Image: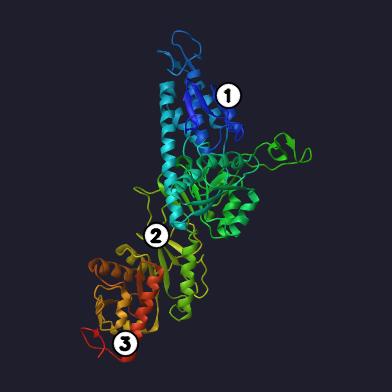
């Protein structure tokens, strides 16, 4: 058995019987549709991508079984790997009926129906055509999993930092659940190869212990450090600082980002959200079901009571105990930090930017306390990585910013009082409970024209007063030249001896102010990272939120110094020391 968990050999699907692991590694050789269906329903083969490919091989077997010799009106059941005899005729209706049976074997995972649907389209062309399509799918799976795993590993390190990480996973998402590499476990493998894994906590995954039996076996095989725990201990592991991120797979992802996965995933997502821990779903594109609007439409498979009332043939509950045994649960989209596929990060939740939201709220409260963001005035934003859903044309990137919401006191902000907005069109991401301020157009103008990481817009008193005094009525932009002050070094200028700061009119339509700023910054690539708006405060930006805030503080201090020294030279306006 090579690294693939699924092999086609002489007309049979060969795989590992996952029911025997970890103590017995036994081979299954499946030659009939009934054997394929039994292997899927009894979890001898499990994991959404793996059962999808197994189902496709089942269609190969069904097509062969229902291929008749053109000269003898009888089914050809003895065809080997070479395919049907020349002149064979496929009973398409019979083969399609078998494909229906296979697709219905497990209802929750979309990959099974997807894979069967992909190969059944070629039944009329004969068994060789169905086999060729299935083998293409098998080869694709390994490439897809490696790409998704690599993208997920990249995201985890961006979110958690370049250091040995403590990770948590649920159920089994390795090569046993796919055909090679794995999804969430694939990401663990990539991180381990980078030397970035300190420890992996493995949920045992009741009631069939896929984590204990399969994931622990795979991680040991790969040499990845891990500890096994009971499912109900996962939240406490998070609370005690033992988890930096949660990585799970998926069986179906709906159009809005709801995720169906092994039962117990929902509770992990709730705990991760409470503790501010990234909750990342890794899955192939084939797991995304964009035709299904929300998780409310997902049919959750209910499994046998015996899986709960006993284990290993030993009864653990009173006879005739009623049982609730869903195989899966559905995690709402607002609990999912990101969905990662072979295409990269295809979905980043509008409500999952906890760290950035907390940083924005903290600085907003500080500036409110200084009187620079009185009441609901002023806004702070940061640029974030937030792809669209579903993936857009090209690389799917959706350049976005996270900004303080409209109509809220800046002295009472929390991490949730932010809004995700597209930089290109200043449109808020769907499904958010807050609305962005009209001043968002000022921020997007900066992000569209500068590689800024953060923008601060405040109504600091001395800067606002100076801009209002300096502005020349009728001018599209008033250039305000300031020279000779030591504080000019705080703006990162190539020549800190002087600076020309634009003063923009305060139009009633804030979008027009944003358009003016956009035009000016495009026409003046060397403009400083600071600007005035008449009667409307100042806007500053920088690589980080701290740098943008520091520049706002520096500009306000400079304007206070100018006011206290009385320097107000005439047109062309130049302000400097005597």
Residue drawn where x is 31% and y is 64% of the image: 450
Whether residue 514 is situated above or below residue 151 in the rendered picture: below
Left or right of residue 349: residue 525 = left
Few, some or many C-alpha atoms within 10 Å of disc 1 (few <14, some 14-19, many ≥20)?
A: some
Left or right of residue 103: residue 193 = left
The residue indicated by pointer 2 is 400
The residue indicated by pointer 1 is 34
Q: Which mark is residue 247?
A: none
Sequence-first tag of 1 and 3 = 1
The alpha-carbon separation of the residues under discs 2 and 1 comes to 50 Å
Residue 394 visible in rendering: yes
CB under 8 Å between discs 3 and 2? no
Residue 278 spot, x, y in % from top left? 51, 56
Sequence-first tag of 3 and 2 = 2
Few, some or many C-alpha atoms within 10 Å of disc 2 (few <14, some 14-19, many ≥20)?
A: many
Q: Nearer the viewer, residue 186 or 134?
A: 186
**Quadrant position of the C terminus in the picture:** bottom left
Q: Secondary structure at mark 1?
A: helix
Q: Quadrant of residue 512?
A: bottom left
Residue drawn where x is 34% and y is 64% of the image: 447
Residue 180 spot, x, y in % from top left? 47, 36
Q: Secondary structure at mark 2?
A: strand
Instruction: State the residue lying farthest toward the top.
Output: 71
Residue 405 visible in rendering: no
The residue indicated by pointer 3 is 562
Whether residue 84 is situated above or below residue 426 in the rendered picture: above
Left or right of residue 396: residue 281 = right
Q: Secondary structure at mark 3?
A: helix
Residue drawn where x is 53% and y is 36% of the image: 176
């Amino acid at each position: 058995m090579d690294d693939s968990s699924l092999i086609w050999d002489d007309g049979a699907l060969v795989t590992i019987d996952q029911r025997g692991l970890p103590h017995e590694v036994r081979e299954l050789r499946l030659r009939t549709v009934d054997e394929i269906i039994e292997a899927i329903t009894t979890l001898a083969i499990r994991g959404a991508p793996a059962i999808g490919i197994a189902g496709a091989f089942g269609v190969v077997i069904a097509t062969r079984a229902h291929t008749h010799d053109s000269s003898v009106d009888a089914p050809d059941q003895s065809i080997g790997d070479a395919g049907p005899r020349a002149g064979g005729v496929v009973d398409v209706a019979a083969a399609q009926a078998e494909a229906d049976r296979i697709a219905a074997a497990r209802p929750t995972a979309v990959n099974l129906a997807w894979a069967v649907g992909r190969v059944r389209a070629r039944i009329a062309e004969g068994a060789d055509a169905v086999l060729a399509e299935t083998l293409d799918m098998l080869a694709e799976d390994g490439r897809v999993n490696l790409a998704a795993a690599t993208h997920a590993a990249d995201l985890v390190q961006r979110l958690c930092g370049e250091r040995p990480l403590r990770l948590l996973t649920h159920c089994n998402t390795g090569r046993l659940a796919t055909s090679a590499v794995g999804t969430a476990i694939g990401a663990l493998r990539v991180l381990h190869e980078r030397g970035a894994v300190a420890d992996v906590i493995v949920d045992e995954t009741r009631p069939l212990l896929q984590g204990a039996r399969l994931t622990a076996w795979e991680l040991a095989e790969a040499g990845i450090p891990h500890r096994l725990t009971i499912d109900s201990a996962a939240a406490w592991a998070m609370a005690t600082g033992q988890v930096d991120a949660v990585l799970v797979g998926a069986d179906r992802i709906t159009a809005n980002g709801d995720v169906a996965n092994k039962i117990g995933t929902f509770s992990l997502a709730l705990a991760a959200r409470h503790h501010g821990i990234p909750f990342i779903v890794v899955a192939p594109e084939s797991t995304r079901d964009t035709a299904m609007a929300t998780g409310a439409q997902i049919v959750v498979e209910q499994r046998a009571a015996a899986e709960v009332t006993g284990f290993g043939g030993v009864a653990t509950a009173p006879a005739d105990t009623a049982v609730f045994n869903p195989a899966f649960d559905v995690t709402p989209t607002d609990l999912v930090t990101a969905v990662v596929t072979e295409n990269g990060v295809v979905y980043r939740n509008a409500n999952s930017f906890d760290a950035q939201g907390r940083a924005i709220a903290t600085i907003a409260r500080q500036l409110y306390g200084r009187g620079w963001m009185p009441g609901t005035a002023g806004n702070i934003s940061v640029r974030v990585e937030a792809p669209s859903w579903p993936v857009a044309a090209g690389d799917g990137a959706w350049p976005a910013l996270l900004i303080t919401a409209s109509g809220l006191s800046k002295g009472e902000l929390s991490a949730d009082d932010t809004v995700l907005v597209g930089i290109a069109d200043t449109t808020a991401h769907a499904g958010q409970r807050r609305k962005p301020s009209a001043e968002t157009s000022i921020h997007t103008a900066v992000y569209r024209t500068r590689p800024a990481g953060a923008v601060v817009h405040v109504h600091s008193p001395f800067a606002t007063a100076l801009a209002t005094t300096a502005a020349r009525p009728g001018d599209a932009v008033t250039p305000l030249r300031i020279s000779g002050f030591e504080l000019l070094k705080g703006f990162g200028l190539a020549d800190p001896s002087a600076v020309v700061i634009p003063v923009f009119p305060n139009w009633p339509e804030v979008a027009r102010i944003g358009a003016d700023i956009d035009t000016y910054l495009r026409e003046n690539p060397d403009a400083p990272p600071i600007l005035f708006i008449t009667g409307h405060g100042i806007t500053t930006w920088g690589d980080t939120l701290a740098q943008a805030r520091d520049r706002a503080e520096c500009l306000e201090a400079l304007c206070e110094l100018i006011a206290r020294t009385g320097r107000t030279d005439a047109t062309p306006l130049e302000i400097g020391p005597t």
